[in-house]
Amino acid sequence: MRAKTTMRDSAPNISFIFDEKFIQAKEGDTFASALTRAGIYDLKESLDGSRRGLYCGMGVCNECAIVVNGTPGKLACMTSVCNGDEVSRQPAYPSINSVDYVALPESEISPDVLVIGAGPAGLATAAVCAEAGLLVVLLDERAKLGGQYFKQPVDPLLREDQLDSQFLEGRALIQRARTSGVEVLTGASIWGAFAPNHLVAASTTHRWVLKPKSLVIATGAYEKSFQIPGWTLPGVMTTGAAQTLLRSYQVLLGSKIFISGNGPLNIQMAAELIRAGGSVAGLAELGSPFKIKNIFTSLTLAWYSPKLVLNGLGYFFTLLRAKVPIYFSSAVIEASGTPLLSVVKVASITSDGSTSNSGVKLFRVDALALGYGFMPSNEIARSLGCKHAFDIQSQTLQVSRDNFGETSIKGVYVVGDSGGISGAQVAKANGIMAGYAIVESAGKVIPSALKREIKTAQRRYKRNLKFQKSLWKVFRGSLNLDQLSDSTTIICRCLSLSKEEISGEISEELLTAGALKRVTRAGMGICQGRYCSSFTIAKAAEKTQSTPSEYSGFAPQPPFKPTPIGIIAQSTAS
């Protein structure tokens, strides 16, 4: 489904074949954006025979894998369309042709600073370090810089008068990094981290051995799973995936959309869909931000960041003008349809996180966006041995770091949401602070401009941290996710393992997430447990009546993302 007319419409038309049908696309489209525009949601067959489709939209879940020109495993959300491509749905057990492996060229780079991740934090750190005269390499797995928050539209959309403040802030930061002399490697993923000064990366055309003096991990976060009946249906995706479709490609996720989650991102998403000409059937917000008890906290939000509060009110009034039904203290508790999503069930959620039996509503939709917070992408930091601690409130593992982002390992910095979820503005300020610390530790003369900037960044860092703390008081909501899922609900998407198949194995002999992984194989799928680990950790802690720690989950191991075996074998041999 296409958004209302924009500059994107003037982009050159291209086409490809999908399951013997011609599909129109725009130059710059990914297969995910082109197929969603065409109303095609089911992209692969799962191990249980059901269909799956776009879910995370950022290359984490691997549920949008397709076969492109005979090669399986290509992610629709990360792969650009080329005119004339032949594409098909990926079967559960794709055939892999035997081919002669063509060795990729390898380069060894020893920069002063290696920054992994080109979102707000990574871009800011890279720019500050390069401006001070350090040799900086910035690496990101996406083709474009900006990360999830500053994601940029494809080139035909790049016209200043059509970009909002979020786009423009991102463009300015990207331009700053490029003009500072940062060496940028896009489309490249770190697949192994063996020491702070020994990392390996690869793209489709090249391999790198990276030996930095200082390492900055700015890998951001991915969205938490929301394991309700039907969450694996094609047409159900994260709010982040829906936002990428709209903001980068001007594609609506469906013709009739429902949004459910917790936090302001979902309200923003609903408003942006309305402004783009979309049809939003409703919004279910777990919290109750407009309760009387939240008035004082809301005033503190306006004090800390009046611009963000005004933007938020603007989104809310957009929904009111469009008469979009908004249900507070509510959530989608079930999605259903065969083989695609067609109905969602919405219910009120009580203060203890239980489902209320009264007021259950059904909505006929073809798309559902779920946004219930984020998980730090911490596999690289954990693999290196950086100390972490389990945060009870957010139920996430957070890195131990000082105010400048330096971890328990000297010279290794974790900045932004990869160390703990605090939002884009905190991440950007954190990146500037980390850059300052690295420049200072390198013995470089601190430019006067950087001295002024670090003071501003420190103020903004503290102010925006307070904003985030107050924000989540306003949006506070509890939900007993275990109550919403039944015994047949899929928990491990990759291997189609149900709640009963995993929790049923817990016994006196199997009391850890790692033990459950070895017996049930939950966490051995292609996403490496990113979406089922929370469930197994919680169940193990519940059984042992203990608090999770940094060792409670699945141990990170290379490759961190799916990597051709030829690349690994070649790297090992060399």
Image: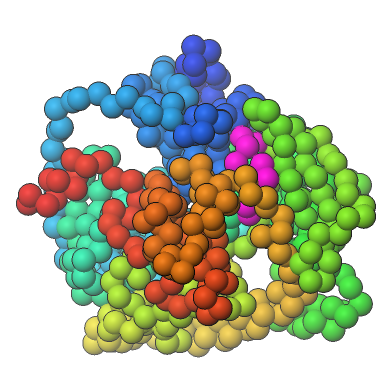
Residue ID at (32%, 52%): 189
Foreground of the two, 94 or 317: 94
Residue 354, image x, y percentages: 79, 64
> Residue 360 vs residue 69: left or right?
right
Measured from the top left, where is residue 183 in percent x and y? 28, 58
Residue at 14 percent across and 57 percent down: it is 108
Q: Is residue 221 left or right of residue 297?
A: left
Q: 368 and 50: which one is in front? A: 50
Q: Which residues are magenta?
A: 226-235
Q: Nearer the viewer, residue 67 or 343?
A: 343
Q: Main secondary structure of the magenta part?
A: loop
Q: Is residue 174 visible?
A: no
Looking at the rendering, which quadrant does residue 386 occupy?
bottom left
Q: Position of residue 543 (x, y in %)?
A: 55, 71
Q: Is residue 60 above or below residue 289?
A: above
> Measured along the vertical axis of the image, is residue 495 above or below residue 136?
above
- Placement of the N terminus among the 4 image quadrants: top right
Q: Give the image location of residue 492, x and y in percent.
A: 51, 49
